[in-house]
Amino acid sequence: MDKRSEIYMWQAIQEAEKARAINEVPIGAVIVLGDEVIATAHNLRETKQNAVAHAELLAIEQACKKLGTWRLEQAELYVTLEPCPMCSGAILLSRIKKVVYGATDPKAGCAGTLMNLLQDDRFNHQCEIESGVLGGVCGELLSEFFRKVRAIRKAEKLNGRE
């Protein structure tokens, strides 16, 4: 893991913290072109009540608008959680060069954990992948969030029975 990857992953973690602050699943994404951050985003699925408001998709949309093109061929995406199938599809379609992620996702990860859509040579584009960058920090953010959610749900169930 190089210093550059860590620097941009910390920025993605800051985005994840923004999501957590509004009770969204704490996932953040940053898109970099050269040495410039061209897009940042965090999950807004609950806020927008929109199934596709994932951090990666919001960042890709922002980067495309900024550059005036759907082709992000030299861009790198830094994201705190391994991309899901939907986000992996968007990553491939936008031609992102490299994906760097923190925590693995055993239930939906499509950058090598559950499956590897990003490097499947049946598609007309493949991405470089760097995994596990600040994975412990990214994973703990998610674990802490879901522990809190479970505790709240448990308390609500107990209060509902009394």
Image (cartoon, helix red, strand yellow):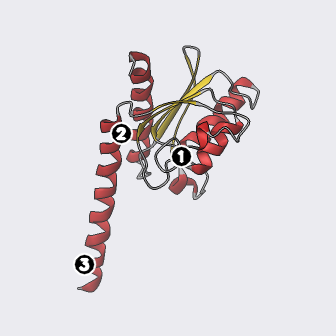
In terms of depth relative to the viewer, which is nearer, 83 or 27?
Answer: 83
Which labelled disc corresponds to residue 48?
A: none
Query: Residue drawn at (65%, 44%), measured in percent from left and top?
Result: 89
Pointer 3 residue? 158
Q: Is mark 3 on a helix, strand or loop?
A: helix
Q: In which quarter of the image is the C terminus?
A: bottom left
Disc 3 residue crowd, few under 14, some 14–19, many 20+, Cα 10 Å: few
Amino acid type shown at disc 3: Leu
Pointer 2 residue? 138
Residue lying at the far top in this picture: please name it.
35
Amino acid type shown at disc 2: Cys
Amino acid type shown at disc 1: Cys
Q: What element carries label 1?
A: loop
Residue 26 relative to residue 29: left or right: left
Question: CA separation, marks 1 and 2?
Answer: 17 Å
Disc 2 residue crowd, few under 14, some 14–19, many 20+, Cα 10 Å: many
Q: In this view, does 37 lie above or below 111?
A: above
Q: Where is residue 113 in the image (x, y as percent from the top left)?
A: 46, 46
Question: CA separation, marks 3 and 2?
Answer: 31 Å
Q: What element carries label 2?
A: helix
